[in-house]
Image: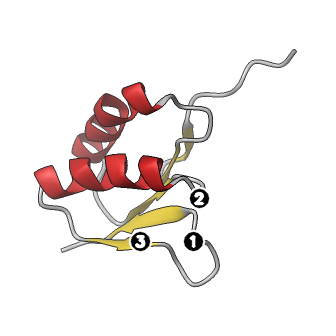
Amino acid sequence: MRKRKRNIESETNLDLHGVKHQDVDILVEEYVLLHTPPFKIITGHSGIMKQLVIEVLDRHKYKYQDGSLHNLGCILVLSE
């Protein structure tokens, strides 16, 4: 069985596939505080996962777009 790589897909994307809901808050908060927008948070199509991410973004007053033209399973965090 292969071990999954860290949940950071690249310098500008955070991939939450395989992350437990209970771990989302701290993981997303650390990521958004360490990276400068724009970047993408890949949530998959889970409404709960998206809501958890949005709660963190709202808490820190980030502007975001739910989904993109080609991928509804992500949240785009926008630059000021």
Q: In terms of secondary structure, where does tag 2 sit?
A: loop
Q: Are marks 2 and 1 in contact (CB under 8 Å)?
A: yes
Residue located farthest toward the bottom when viewing the structure as drawn: 69
Q: Cα distance, mark 1 to mark 3?
A: 7 Å
Scheme by which the image is coloured: secondary structure
Which mark is nearer the camera, 3 or 2? 2
Whole-percent x and y of residue 28? 34, 40
Q: Cα distance, mark 2 to mark 1?
A: 7 Å
Residue found 26% across the figure and 39% down from its top: 29
Q: Residues within 10 Å of mark 1 (few under 14, many from 20)?
A: few
Residue bearing the label numbered 2: 45
Whole-percent x and y of residue 79? 26, 71
| Residue type at tag 2 | His
User: Residue 50: which quarter of the image?
Assistant: bottom left
Residue found 57% across the figure and 63% down from its top: 73
User: Residue 54: which quarter of the image?
Assistant: bottom left
Q: Which badge, 1 or 3, comes first in the chain's sequence?
A: 3
Whole-percent x and y of residue 22? 39, 26
| Residue type at tag 1 | Leu
Q: Which badge, 2 or 1, comes first in the chain's sequence?
A: 2
**Position above or below: 71 against 22:** below
The circle drawn on residue 72 is 1
**Position above or below: 48 against 27:** below
The circle drawn on residue 10 is none
Residue bearing the label numbered 3: 66
